[in-house]
Image (cartoon, rainbow, N blue to C red):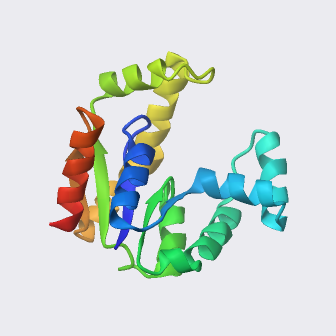
Amino acid sequence: MRLLFIGPPGAGKGTQAARVADRLGIPHISTGEMFRHHVEQGTELGRQVKAIMESGAYVPDEITVEMLRQRLEESDAVRGFILDGFPRTAPQVAALDQLIGEDGLHMVVLFEVDEDELTDRLMSRGRLDDSEETIRHRFKVYEEQTAPLISLYESRDIVVRVDGHGPLEDVTNRVLRAVTA
């Protein structure tokens, strides 16, 4: 089962990806974790990523895609995976399609949570970079760059919408029902 979890910042994608991946026995593949792994291992890609991240710039798609290609070749990803954090833009969708084929994803799980709830969640995390202004900007970037992917995947008829409100376990159960239906 090859899944993509998508939704606005604070929707619970990473948390749910880890929980659902564990229950399904497939890896949760997060771009952030891939970056950290390569940096910690001191790989060539890791050295490139570290320098880019320290400069405050975004890691170029070519590097992210190469890391993802390597990750998908690992034995635990043969039975499936959950992607979290990639793709976020139309060019990244094209790159993913090249890696796994246009019909490579079985399902895209879209987490739906209203913006006030998302803001409350993000503000309560207590991170220094989670000011209300920063959070609103992240929502704007999501709407401009990532939200358009939803219609692209809807045209492939693989999007399922999941209510992201409520207790963690309730959301996990809704996701599991959606992906195993």
The residue under the point 58% across, 56% down is 31
The residue under the point 50% across, 33% down is 138
Give the answer, above or below, for where 53 lies relative to 64: above
Q: Is residue 155 left or right of residue 36?
A: left
Give the answer, above or below, for where 29 lies relative to 136: below
The residue under the point 36% across, 38% down is 11
Q: How far across and how far down the image is residue 40, in percent?
A: 78, 54
Q: How far across and how far down the image is residue 74, in percent?
A: 59, 77
**Which quadrant is the C terminus positioned in?**
bottom left
Q: In the picture, residue 45 is in which quadrant? A: bottom right
Q: In the picture, residue 80 is in which quadrant? A: bottom left
**Which quadrant is the N terminus positioned in?**
bottom left
Residue 149 visible somewhere in the drawing: no
Q: Residue furthest left?
A: 181
Residue 104 visible somewhere in the drawing: yes
Q: Is residue 120 left or right of residue 92?
A: left
Number of residue marks: 0
